[in-house]
Image (spheres, grey):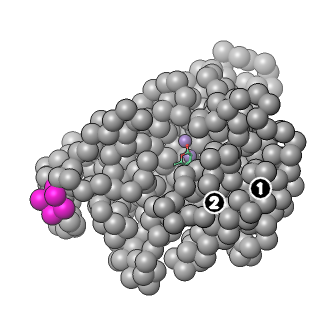
Amino acid sequence: MRIEKYKIEEHNQFLLKEHKRRFDFIASDIKNIEDILQKLIEFQVAIPSWALGTGGTRFARFSGGGEPKNLEEKIEDIGLLHALNRSSGAISLHIPWDIPKNAANIKALAAQLDIRFDAMNSNTFQDQPDQKLSYKFGSMQHVDKAVRKQAVEHNIEVIKYGVELGSESLTVWLSDGSCFPGQLNFRKAFQNTLESLQEVYAALPDNWKMFVEYKPYEPNFYSMTVGDWGQSLLYVTKLGIKAYTLVDLGHHLPNANIEQIVALLLMEGKLGGFHFNDSKYSDDDLTVGSIKPYQLFLIFNELVEGMNARGMHHATDLGWMIDASHNVKDPLEDLLQSVETIMISYAQALLVDRKKLVDAQNNNDVVAAQEILQHSFRTDMRVLIAEARLRAGGALNPLIVYRAEKVRENLIKERGSKTVATGL
Ligand code: RM4
Ligand code: MN
Ligand code: MN
């Protein structure tokens, strides 16, 4: 299914008067509004190929119907999102869930829909039917060199698929670790993992980046071999300039100060990318900003401050990806909400009066510092996001159009109610 441009314009016409009234009201208050709008238009968030179907837990999975059956349909789904919000112009692929069987065709389809290929993801946390050796006791950390070699070769294959599609980065998330004390020699596990990562790193094309993602627990519950940002930073520092740490918001122990982690990784030039989601307890993969919107804002505040300090381009110098799982919502609606929330937090961070904040910090004026941040956080930026979308050719209100055009109903009609998308 595709949504024609004139349909979006029709909907916009209907909402335009009210939008203009609200926009003019806020515009007079914001000094750098044109700059903010330009940055919002440029900012793109990659959609994960594994989150376009219904997610599940280890207890059950309740499909919503009309799920994409193959990579082409996944790209079409992202095309729908991008047509509506003009901020989802990228896809992050997971291999082997989404092997591009005909790269040229896939590339052409994506180009038609104005979608590029963001980070490629490898998978050595599951065994595949045709796989020789098992990852039950880890992949890159494994005591058996042959298993490590298999994991390395898989990652190199993922890079090859990425090269065919025009991707420029590889994300490695390892489930390696141990479930019980004594199971593993921590030092040897680290060294094996480092050596394996080095072999993959050696196969990276010059213009590629490698992201090493950390996670404190699950599926291993006693230790994880890339368990936190310190461990990831150790690996990427040893690997070299093309290696960076990737922060997945759900991959922290409760109450971790993620914004501080982000600030320090950026300071070291070692922050590579993001996986957006939210969590109440652990790696819940809930909609970003649905539980802790203030934390998300504080993270963006550090991102903007830190990227500016290093002269980085906000939209392109870091990898921005969603990594969520939709168990009870329509995945496409959830993704529209996710992108909107990310844009809002980014816009709020752009609004922060940096000069005043520095003054407050230098004067130890704690109250003023809090006021400055909370002023931005409490400013309703939704109308700015809508204006940026409008200027970029998207919908003033993507969710309204999605529902009015009966997208899910149409997808169910096209694809059936029993299709199952590969992924989580
Ligand atoms: C992991 C991690 C990875 C993702 C897999 C599916 O928990 O977040 O980024 O690729 O899930
Ligand atoms: Mn992740
Ligand atoms: Mn995760």
Q: Position of residue 1 (x, y in %)?
A: 20, 65
Badge 2 amino acid: Leu
Residue for point 46% across, 80% down: 103
* Element type at mark 1: loop
Residue for point 74% across, 42% down: 225
Residue found farthest to the bottom: 104
Q: Disc number at residue 133?
A: 2
Q: Are marks 1 and 2 in contact (CB under 8 Å)?
A: yes
Q: Disc number at residue 104?
A: none
Question: Which of pointers 1 and 2 lies earlier in the amino acid sequence?
Answer: 2
Q: Disc number at residue 144?
A: 1
Q: Position of residue 2 (x, y in %)?
A: 22, 66
For residue 218, which quarter of the picture?
top right
Q: Residues within 10 Å of mark 1 (few under 14, many from 20)?
A: some
Tell me, yes or no, whether the highlighted magenta stretch contains residue 29: no
* Element type at mark 2: loop
The one nearer the camera, 402 or 19, is: 402
Q: Image check: 376 left or right of 408?
A: right
Badge 1 amino acid: Asp
The one nearer the camera, 219 or 5, is: 219
For residue 366, which quarter of the picture?
top right
Residue for point 73% across, 59% down: 148
For residue 133, which quarter of the picture?
bottom right
